[in-house]
Image (cartoon, coloured by chain):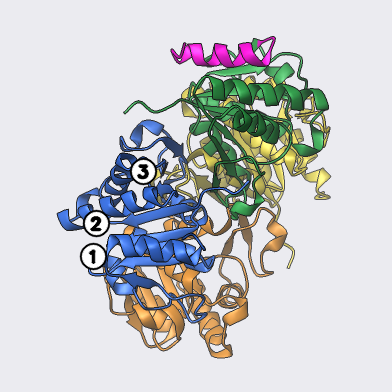
Chain colours: A blue, B green, C yellow, D orange
């Protein structure tokens, strides 16, 4: 069985998400769905919610992997919810579950997910000029092992295409 | 948005799964799919694999939530894989993510998932006479708080129907 | 370097701890300290607090391994606090960190810790007639693998002596 | 009860630890012990081992919080070992358990621990010119919230003194 690819979208949470980043995330989610990939998010607000809405409206399948122990804490745009109950240690689970990661802005939690994915060699693509952590880490390596660079693309759509092309998805 | 219910199937792992339990688990998975619920499992062999095969063949959606940090460790019948990387602490995540739990035999790990689900008041239904932990805990309460009894049903199909009826799924 | 043995004491939490179980736990903690072992607990109230007080008054060293992400949530009798932030998945960490486990009453969470320790073959000794899970599981095996039986001793002191004798501590 | 402060030392692991960083970490561990604080580490090699040796030789108490599920995986210089079994999600536990963090070089895992501690507002002090992540993050904020800057000190001893002075330890 060939499973669908799982694309994780991370970035600004509800309290720090500019309107522009929200729009970009919506388009990223839609592009993930159109490519036939499953969308993974942390299941909360901001970028996570926007990407989930975009994927859902485009007919995709959305899984929210939340830090809390009750599924009711997820946003309203998840088809399935994984309630980890392990707090922000959840960031390792989102990362390890991803075939590829798209980054839109973000803060310290986003950086943790990037670093966890980097350690596994999972491809990471930022959408350029979305601010926060995305703009800080783009075109760099997370550490001196230089496992793989953090890539950047100019648009939501090209970021998804780039990430999936690394996985040999046309 | 009304999400599909998520039914967790637990029990004997690969090394301890009698052929009869495997067949029962296959039928449980198929029944979960026919009822329109998402199947959750721990993503390995034995009961987990059998239920996943049953659900997949019946057209359902299967999520494997594995203890390892690499999705490649899951069985071949998952539509999506959550790679937790947290070892058997994963048992809390499967439990917390379930709307209802079906038990087919099982050992100490199955007991942990039952106890975690019990603490949350999540409905638990065993298939009777499948051996192991299922037969030990049926018709009892896990502790003196008597939150909810562990129920038992005679067949794979009636176990799924019972579990979903508690959730008001016809 | 020969490390001190680490003895985990588990059982009734604050809301369900009879006065008699509290006294037994205090004596268990004191006996652990007198034997020169480090006391591990889940860092909360009830049996955990009582054992910690007993060990501390007897000059022992106490480590509380709590489910929350802030050390301030621990009881006042810990020399060191490990703030896991992973909720009750913490029960695996207490179990895996134990050289031996002493059980005084307890509910579903206690059962989870017992089952996790059992899977690792870690010796488990209950104090008899302390109620709850301790009395249910004593003299049984957790599952059909029969890895090791749950032992029982009549007093706090003999439970500690028994547990440590299995570890070759005189 | 006033608990001893818990100082976490993080940085290069066994495979990437220059001899100079090992020496600095040894001195950091010794300084932590002389100040009467408990040393926390991830329990492995490199900086973790060196700091543990330094603290142990100076008469301190050392707790190794390891990612594996077996205490035997820890280095030989821990007085107590917490076996989490949750893989590198353990990095959140070391961070949350720290009153202060000292950084000596390090890679992606070190960055995760820094980001987790930063989110909690836990003081973080690097030893300058130890390479790796330490030199990259010093004098910066991890994200735009600017919760607290990553501090830097020239020597092992001044880093420990600085960290503890923030906690009002003379």
Q: Nearer the viewer, residue B91 or A136?
A: A136
Other residues around mark 1 within 10 Å, as few (<14) / some (14–19) / many (≥20): many
Q: Which residue position is annotated with label 1?
A: A130
Which residue, given by chain and number where applicable, does mark 3 sit on? A43
Q: Are marks 3 and 2 on the same chain?
A: yes
Q: Chain of mark 1?
A: A
Image: C6 above or below B161: below
Q: Are marks 3 and 1 on the same chain?
A: yes
Would residue B165 be counted in the magenta stretch? yes
Q: Are marks 1 and 2 in contact (CB under 8 Å)?
A: yes
Q: Is residue B132 left or right of residue A36?
A: right
* Marks 1/2: CA–CA distance: 8 Å
- Which residue is drawn at the image coordinates 56% and 84% (left, top)? D22
* The quadrant where residue D81 appears: bottom right
- Given contact means CB atoms under 8 Å apart, are the residues at marks 3 and 1 in contact? no
For marks 3 and 1, the one nearer the N-term is: 3
Mark sitting earlier along the chain (3/2): 2
Q: Examine the image and state in which quarter residue C129 appears.
A: top right
Query: Which quadrant would the N terminus of chain C be assigned to in this image?
Result: bottom right
Q: Position of residue C34 (x, y in %)?
A: 68, 47
Q: Which chain is home to disc 3?
A: A
Say what secondary structure mark 2 lies in. Answer: helix
Q: Which residue is mark 2?
A: A24
Residue drawn at (57%, 23%) of the image: B32
For label 2, count other residues whose C-alpha is less than 10 Å away and answer few (under 14), some (14-19) or many (20+): many
Q: Main secondary structure of the magenta part?
A: helix
Q: Which residues are magenta?
A: B153-170
Of all chains, the one bearing label 2 is A
Of the two numbered discs 3 and 1 in the rendering, the one whose residue sits closer to the viewer: 1
């Amino acid at each position: 069985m060939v499973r669908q690819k799982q694309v994780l979208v991370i970035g600004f949470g509800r309290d720090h998400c500019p309107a522009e980043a929200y729009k970009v995330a919506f388009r990223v989610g839609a592009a993930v769905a159109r490519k036939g990939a499953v969308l993974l998010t942390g299941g909360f607000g901001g970028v996570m919610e926007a990407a989930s809405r975009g994927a859902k409206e485009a007919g995709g399948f959305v899984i929210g992997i939340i830090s809390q122990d009750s599924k009711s804490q997820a946003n309203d745009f998840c088809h399935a919810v994984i309630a980890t109950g392990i707090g922000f240690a959840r960031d390792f689970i989102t990362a390890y579950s991803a075939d590829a990661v798209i980054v839109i802005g973000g803060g310290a939690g986003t950086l943790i997910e990037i670093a966890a994915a980097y350690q596994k060699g999972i491809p990471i693509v930022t959408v350029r000029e979305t601010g926060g952590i995305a703009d800080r880490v783009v075109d760099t390596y997370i550490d001196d092992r230089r496992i793989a660079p953090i890539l950047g693309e100019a648009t939501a759509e090209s970021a998804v295409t780039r990430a999936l092309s690394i996985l040999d998805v046309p």
